[in-house]
Image (cartoon, helix red, strand yellow):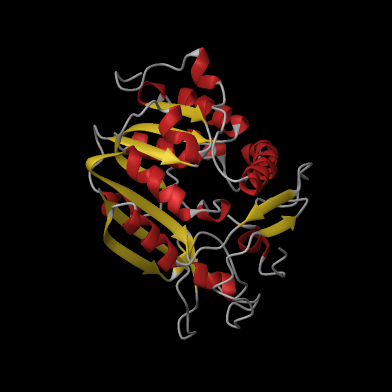
Amino acid sequence: MSEQQEHGSGGRAGTHPAHPAPEADEAREVPEVSGTREAREAREINRANWEDRADVHARSAFYDLPGFRAGASTLRPYEPGEVGEVAGRSLLHLQCHMGQDTLSWARLGARVTGLDFSARAVATARRLAADTGLSGRARFVVADVHEAARALAGERFDIVYTGIGALVWLPDLDRWAGTVASLLKPGGFLYLVELHPVAEVLGDDGRTVEYDYFDRRAQEFDSPHSYTGTDHELTSTRSVQWQHGVGDVVTALARAGLRVEFLHERPSTLFARFPVLERDGGEYRYPAGVPGVPLSYSLRASR
């Protein structure tokens, strides 16, 4: 999630055979060799921020790791239906954080790989896999998303999955889409679930347009807290993020040679993004009778 997504608008500042047991080299972080100097600097700022967040998130009620260990799934209700049967299929989760979504797919029978640039988050994911008896069909790798193909030695997957709040941390969607395409088997597909960028132009009332949808400049934030609450303060407080329109996402995937099968805009989101939203099951949406905007979307694109 972005700072704006986390805290309201508040101003835009700127061991399966295919999955061997982790070896010593798998625990090492894969060094990055690509990207502009500015992108590399932003990535290091964000890495420090997310290493800090990983410890805070693991203790938070928001992520509820005890509930996950007890059997809870973190997938949105519509996700399994849109992806289809995953039993026996290989699934790569990019930017997997602590691996709860990754392992939720493993519980449905997928052979999963989670990849994230935070070593602390990956360490938590590996512990979760062990605690839930899923280590035999789940592995986790420390690497930046753009280095995924190299980190995974050219391995390809039936499904590449990216979940809520991932794309704002990427400066270049063309690079991201090219990486995704390189990781898919022929006939494989990307399944993306994201927060809708239209919500990012609205003020705290959830109704008034206050920001420019077409602003693609890097936005720098400095916050002592993560979106999980104020119980624990961060020490690495800075982050750098980029907003991407839905058209940017679709165009980047098309340029990478992927075919969009569907794009579903949704009136609900993962958390109380605006005070006007009401809880509806495990999500939040505008009340009946109140005009709304799309708050999230899901997309599937095949190779």
Seen in the image, is 244 located left or right of residue 59? left
Q: In this view of the protein, which residue sits in the foreground, 34 or 205? A: 34
Q: Is residue 67 among the parts visible in the rendering?
A: yes
Task: Point out the residue furthest to the top here.
Answer: 24
Seen in the image, is 268 located left or right of residue 46? left
Q: Is residue 279 among the parts visible in the rendering?
A: no
Question: Relative to 282, is 200 above or below?
Answer: below
Question: Relative to 13, is 37 above or below?
Answer: above
Residue at (59% x, 76% y) in the render:
212
| Tally of numbered tags | 0
Query: Residue 143: horizontal and vertical position, in percent?
Result: 52, 32
Which quadrant of the structure image shows residue 134? top left
Query: Residue 209: horizontal and vertical position, in percent?
Result: 59, 82
Task: Point out the residue furthest to the left here.
Answer: 187
Query: Residue 278: horizontal and vertical position, in percent?
Result: 53, 71
Q: In this view of the protein, which residue sits in the foreground, 89 or 229? A: 89
Seen in the image, is 120 located left or right of residue 279? right
Residue at (60% x, 71% y) in the render:
274
Quadrant where the N terminus is found in the figure: bottom right
Which quadrant of the structure image shows residue 49? top right
Residue at (58% x, 34% y) in the render:
121
Question: Relative to 226, is 128 above or below?
Answer: above
Q: In this view of the protein, which residue sits in the foreground, 184 or 165? A: 184
Query: Residue 68: horizontal and vertical position, in percent?
Result: 49, 38
Residue at (57% x, 70% y) in the render:
200
Question: Relative to 261, is 146 above or below?
Answer: above
Seen in the image, is 135 located left or right of residue 254? right
